[in-house]
Image: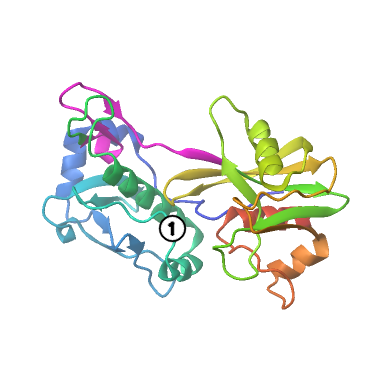
Amino acid sequence: MVIETGFTGGTLDRADALRHDPPAVAALLADPASRLLRLDAFEPVVADDGALSWGTIADAPDGAEFVLLGLAEGRAHFAAVIPGAAPPPPYRSPTLFALLDRLRGGEAATFAGARALIDWHARHPFCARCGHATVPFRAGWGRNCPNCKAEHFPRVDPVVIMIAEHDGRALIGRQAAWPAGRYSALAGFLEPGESIEEAVAREIAEEAGVRVGAVRYVASQPWPFPSQLMIACIAEAEDDAITLDTNELEDARWVTRDEVRAALAGEAGAFGAPPPYAIAHSLLRAWVEG
């Protein structure tokens, strides 16, 4: 089974070789055909057909730094970074929620990469080793320190997101800050010295008090809020007794395939399912379909 997840399926050629060729990147920045991603306060400008909106390099504000997102249709595609600007918020605004629902799959992948990179540049203007101001290099895919020569690269934080299954039912939970009735898979960051399987077992035990055995991988997804890699799994629960950690979850419950199927279909009376661009939605759908 092919599992489709949000923020994947990008069509840009990332053109890694160009990142090592500053004169070639400079030529692309000077090329009138090159395109610049249009953003409105870090949120995408989306056309009626679900496509991202692009301008020219001349549209960038003075002093902007540039990230080469990739190549397509014989043209370079860039995103602009404004030195000194505050990083985008790590949450999704109501406006962004609506825009993400409208974006086509490959377009969402391009936006995800651009937003994660812009966020990283905004959060890393200084060297973690000596504190000196850093400058971009490798076409915006890194920053180096002129003082101590340290090189810094965008980070991706791995997160496990999972359901436990027991006797034909799946374990899901909700946080108090979510929309009323919304339930989703449990999730948590991997910790140092921990495998994916160990992180899945630990997070389920910590949040819901459920012990699990075998863990199987399902799919993954980039999540640009700010820059995670979501690793979706299904774990086999040893029993169904829930002991809730109320610091993490407001509620957790076991649901049947019919209940999940109804929620994914948006039927009234079912719990609120996660949005289609979230990997939790893909994970629940994969579980329903066996």
Residue 231, image x, y percentages? 60, 42
In which quarter of the view is residue 95 placed?
bottom left
State the residue in front, 189 or 107: 189
| Residue drawn 20% across the image and 37% down it | 24
State the residue in front, 273 or 32: 273
90 shown above or below 23: below
In which quarter of the view is residue 237 placed?
top right
Direction right: furthest residue: 167
Question: For the residue labelled by badge 1, is the local secondary structure a helix, a strand or a loop?
Answer: loop
Q: Residues within 10 Å of mark 1 (few under 14, many from 20)?
A: few
| Residue drawn 85% across the image and 44% down it | 239
Residue 226, image x, y percentages? 41, 49
Residue 142 lies in the magenta-colored region: yes
52 shown above or below 131: below
Residue 151, image x, y percentages? 28, 26
Residue 70 located left or right of residue 246: left
- Kindly identify which residue carries mark 1: 91
Direction top: furthest residue: 148
State the residue in front, 39 or 110: 39
Direction left: furthest residue: 62
| Residue drawn 26% across the image and 52% down it | 86
Residue 182 lies in the magenta-colored region: no
Say which amino acid is labelled 1.
Answer: Tyr
Residue 274, image x, y percentages? 61, 62
What are the residue bounds of the magenta stretch? 136-159
How many numbered circles does the render carry? Answer: 1
State the residue in front, 279 or 237: 237
